[in-house]
Image (cartoon, rainbow, N blue to C red):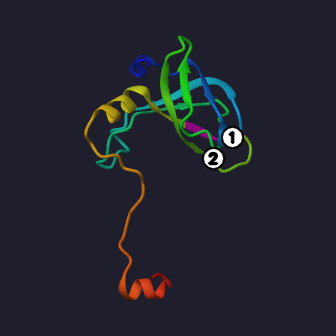
Amino acid sequence: MGDSDKSKIGDKVFVIGAPSGLGRSLLVGYISEKYNGEDHANGLFPLELLQTDAAINKGSSGSLMFNMKREVIGVVSFILGYSKGFQALTFTATSNSVQRLLEGNQGIWTGVDIYVVSGLLAKILNLP
C-alpha cells in the first residue's frame, strides 16, 4: 500500500482491473483532482477521493490504482458519465482512507436503506 497523501495532481497512474469480470485491463492516466472528503461526507465517513482521466470502463469498481512506484494509492469507486464513450470522470477512494475504514470500528455506509414491509403496505405490494 502506498501513501496516497503523497500523490499530487499531475502524477501518472495506472489502473489494473477486470471490467465486469471480462478479463484483465490496463489503463493509464493522470491524477486530475484530489478531494479531501470533508466537503461531501454529509456526516458519514469522510472518504478522500482521487479523480483520474484514465479511460476506466464501467464495471471496474474495486480495481486498483497504482502510482509509478507500483504502490496501490486508490480503489476505483465510481464513474461519473452519461455517454457510452470515455467522456467520464473516474473517482477512486484513496488508499489511506480505505485503510482507515478497514482498520476502524466505524460502520460502513452502503447507500442502502432497509425497511420492514408488513401489513397494508405488504398487501399493496403483493408481498407475503
Q: Would you say 108 lies left or right of 67 here?
A: left
Residue bearing mark 1 = 87
Q: Is residue 22 visible?
A: yes
Q: Is residue 88 magenta?
A: yes
The residue drawn where x is 66% and y is 51% is 82
Percent coordinates x, y for residue 117 in the rendering: 38, 77
The residue drawn where x is 54% and y is 21% is 66
Residue bearing mark 2 = 81
Q: Is residue 18 magenta?
A: no
Percent coordinates x, y for residue 14 in the rendering: 61, 22
The residue drawn where x is 63% and y is 43% is 59
Q: Which comes sooner in the sequence, label 2 or label 1?
A: 2
Q: Are marks 2 and 1 in contact (CB under 8 Å)?
A: yes
Count neighbours of disc 2 (C-alpha within 10 A) and say few if under 14, some if 14 to 19, many if 20 or more: few
Image-quadrant location for residue 24: top right
Q: Would you say 54 lies left or right of 41 here?
A: right
Q: Disc 2 residue type?
A: Gly
Task: Report, in whole angstroms, how far the alpha carbon at label 2 lies from the one at label 1.
Answer: 7 Å
Q: Report the span colored magenta.
A: 86-90
Q: Residue furthest top?
A: 69
Q: Disc 1 residue type?
A: Gln
Q: Residue furthest left?
A: 105
